[in-house]
Amino acid sequence: MEDVDRRVSEERARVEAEYRRVLESSVEFERGIRNRWREKCREKNRRIAQLEKRVAELERRVGQRDP
C-alpha cells in the first residue's frame, strides 16, 4: 500500500509541476501580447500627436497668409 501511495504522490507532483509550467508559459505568452499591444498603442499615439502638430502648423501658416 505504501508503494501505491508513493506512486500517487509522485504522479501528483509531476502533474502539478507540469501544470505550473503550462500556466507560467501561458502567462508569459499573454504578457508578451499585452506588451506588444501597449507599444503599438504608444506608437499610434505618438504618430497622432505628430500629425496633430503638423496640422496645427499648417493651419497657422494658412492663417498668416490670409489678408
Image: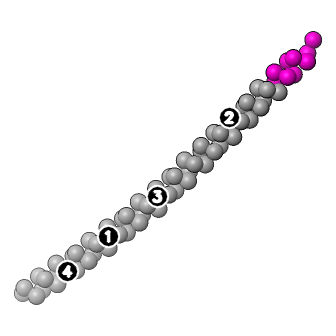
The mark nearer the N terminus, 4 or 1, is 4
Q: Secondary structure at mark 1?
A: helix
Local crowd at mark 3 within 10 Å, few (<14), some, or many (≥20)? few
Q: Is residue 60 magenta?
A: yes
Image side of residue 16 versus residue 58, left or right: left
| Whether label 3 touches label 4, CB < 8 Å | no
Query: Which residue type does callout 2 highlight?
Result: Ala
Mark pair 2, 3: CA separation: 28 Å
The disc label shown at residue 30, or none: 3
Q: Which residue is mark 4?
A: 10
Mark 1 — residue?
A: 19
Evaluate if marks 2 and 4 touch, with contact meaning CB atoms under 8 Å apart: no
Badge 4 amino acid: Glu
The quarter of the picture where the N terminus appears is: bottom left
Find out whether the residues at labels 3 and 1 contact each other: C-beta distance under 8 Å: no
Is 4 on the left or on the right of 12, as rendered?
left
Which quadrant of the rendered structure holds the C terminus?
A: top right
Q: CA separation, marks 3 and 4?
A: 30 Å
The label number, if any, that marks residue 49 in the structure image: 2
Q: Which of the marked residues, 2 or 4, is nearer the chain's N terminus?
A: 4
* Badge 4 element: helix
Q: Nearer the viewer, mark 2 or mark 3?
A: 2
